[in-house]
Image: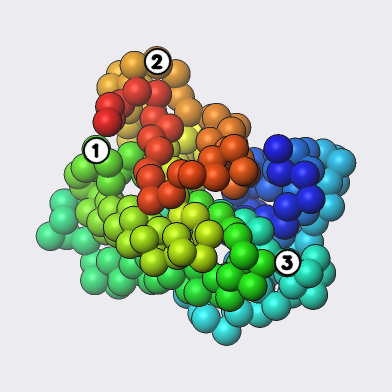
């Protein structure tokens, strides 16, 4: 499905990003695993899948770091076909009533989850325009499509991702660059456990009870949707937010 494509995955050191990188490699993509943390485990998974990839240290809030990521990708593979904007501040955030959220936490969520995606899109659009095509997949969340309370910094940041996706899709359509987003429910990852803390089990149970499919979302459940959006099989799809939430939000 992704044979020969060069795909950047941000936030690839663990969890969902690691699953994307490894599975895309197995589909024939050349993978750039980018994260502020080391991606050694992810690159080992890419190799085990029979794929080719490189790891890049990345701070999505720093445009210089993001530009360097794009430059290294072009130096290694000569092109950029796809970008999965998966990097997000989640597990490190502290939830609670909206008036109790600290300003620094609000600003950090917006810097990583919104500005970070904006930065990464800016870095890849030039090479994609030159190639005459490209696909950007932004990772939103059930928090935005459902309206998750007691985490308004995270919920608002993910709602902004959906707005950014729609507006950018209209801007870039003439360049044959597609922009879509995926909105998963709570995924069985370390980040989810860190975010909910002592309330994790109860929170996951509540999410699961609201789903039509009564099981917890696994990172691998998201791979097919993202791969489809990166491939030519979705060549006429742009500006969309696809919920992968077990049938919670029915659009």
- Quadrant containing the N terminus in the rendered view: top right
Q: Of the two numbered discs 2 and 3 on the same chain, state the one appearing first in sequence.
A: 3
Which quadrant of the view contains residue 168?
Answer: bottom left
How dense is the environment of label 2, judged by Cα within 10 Å: few (below 14), some, or many (20 and up)? few
Q: Which residue does the numbered mark 1 point to in the structure image?
A: 146
- Mark 1, secondary structure of its residue: helix
Q: Of the two numbered discs 1 and 3 on the same chain, state the one appearing first in sequence.
A: 3
Between the residue at mark 1 and the residue at mark 3, the CA separation in whole angstroms equals 37 Å
Q: Position of residue 154 (x, y in %)?
A: 31, 54
Number of the front mark, 2 or 1? 1
Residue 47, visible in the rendered structure: yes
Number of the front mark, 2 or 3? 3
How dense is the environment of label 1, judged by Cα within 10 Å: few (below 14), some, or many (20 and up)? some
- Marking on residue 214: 2
Number of the front mark, 1 or 3? 3
Q: Position of residue 236 (x, y in %)?
A: 49, 44
Q: Which residue sits furthest bottom?
A: 64
Q: Position of residue 29 (x, y in %)?
A: 75, 48
- Residue at image point 55% right, 30% down: 221
């Amino acid at each position: 499905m992704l044979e020969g494509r060069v795909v950047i995955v941000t936030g690839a050191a663990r969890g969902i990003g690691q699953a994307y990188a490894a599975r895309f490699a197995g589909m024939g993509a050349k993978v750039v695993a980018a994260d502020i943390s080391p991606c050694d485990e992810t690159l080992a998974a890419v190799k085990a899948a029979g794929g080719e990839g490189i790891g890049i240290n990345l701070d999505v809030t720093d445009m210089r770091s993001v530009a360097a990521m794009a430059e290294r990708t072009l130096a290694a593979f000569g092109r950029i076909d796809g970008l999965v904007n998966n990097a997000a501040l989640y597990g490190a955030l502290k939830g609670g009533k909206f008036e109790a959220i600290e300003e620094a936490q609000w600003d950090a969520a917006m810097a990583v989850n919104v500005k970070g995606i904006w930065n990464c899109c800016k870095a890849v659009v030039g090479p994609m325009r030159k190639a005459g095509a490209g696909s950007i997949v932004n990772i939103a969340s059930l928090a935005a499509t459902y309206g998750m309370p007691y985490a308004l910094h995270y919920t608002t940041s993910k709602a902004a991702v959906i707005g950014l996706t729609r507006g950018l899709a209209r801007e870039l359509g003439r360049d044959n660059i597609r922009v879509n987003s995926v909105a998963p429910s709570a995924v069985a990852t370390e980040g989810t456990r860190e975010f909910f803390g002592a309330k994790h089990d109860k929170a996951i149970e509540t999410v699961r009870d609201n789903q039509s499919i009564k099981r917890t979302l696994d990172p691998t459940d998201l791979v097919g949707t993202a791969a489809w959006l990166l491939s030519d099989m979705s060549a006429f799809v742009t500006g969309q937010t696809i919920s992968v939430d077990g049938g919670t939000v029915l659009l």
